[in-house]
Amino acid sequence: MNKRITPVIDEILRLFGNRKMDLPQQNAINYLIRSLLISKISLMIELFKNQTLMSAAVENKENNSLAEIEPIGNA
């Protein structure tokens, strides 16, 4: 994953190249970009898991009572 994220960060820093940033500013930008990318990837993973569970629920149309249902996923 780092191989895909690092070039994106480098490209964004290149776009900011006209501005003179010191090391703490560059680190702050790196942190913000990495956090954004990680949040997006995490969201995509959770959406995929949700879609998979929903399609499995549609395929399995058994009428289970609430007492028989097991919790799935993370809260």
Image: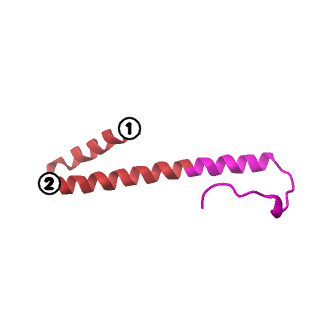
In the visual, does 53 lie left or right of 25? right
Provide the residue designation for mark 1: 4
> Disc 1 on helix, strand or loop?
helix
What segment is highlighted magenta in the picture?
A: 46-75
Looking at the rendering, in which quadrant would you find the C terminus? bottom right
Residue 35 in which image quadrant: bottom left
Residue 14: x and y, percent? Answer: 22, 44
Q: Does dot 2 land on a helix, a strand or a loop? A: loop
| Residue that numbered label 2 is attached to | 22
Task: Work out which residue is located at the far top of the displayed protein and give it.
Answer: 3
Dot 2: few (<14), some (14–19), or many (≥20) neighbours within 10 Å? few
63 within the magenta span: yes
Q: Quick one: quadrant of the N terminus?
A: top left
Residue at 86% x, 52% y: name it: 62
Q: Nearer the viewer, residue 70 or 46?
A: 70
- Could you say where residue 58 lies in the image, as x and y percent from the top left? 77, 49
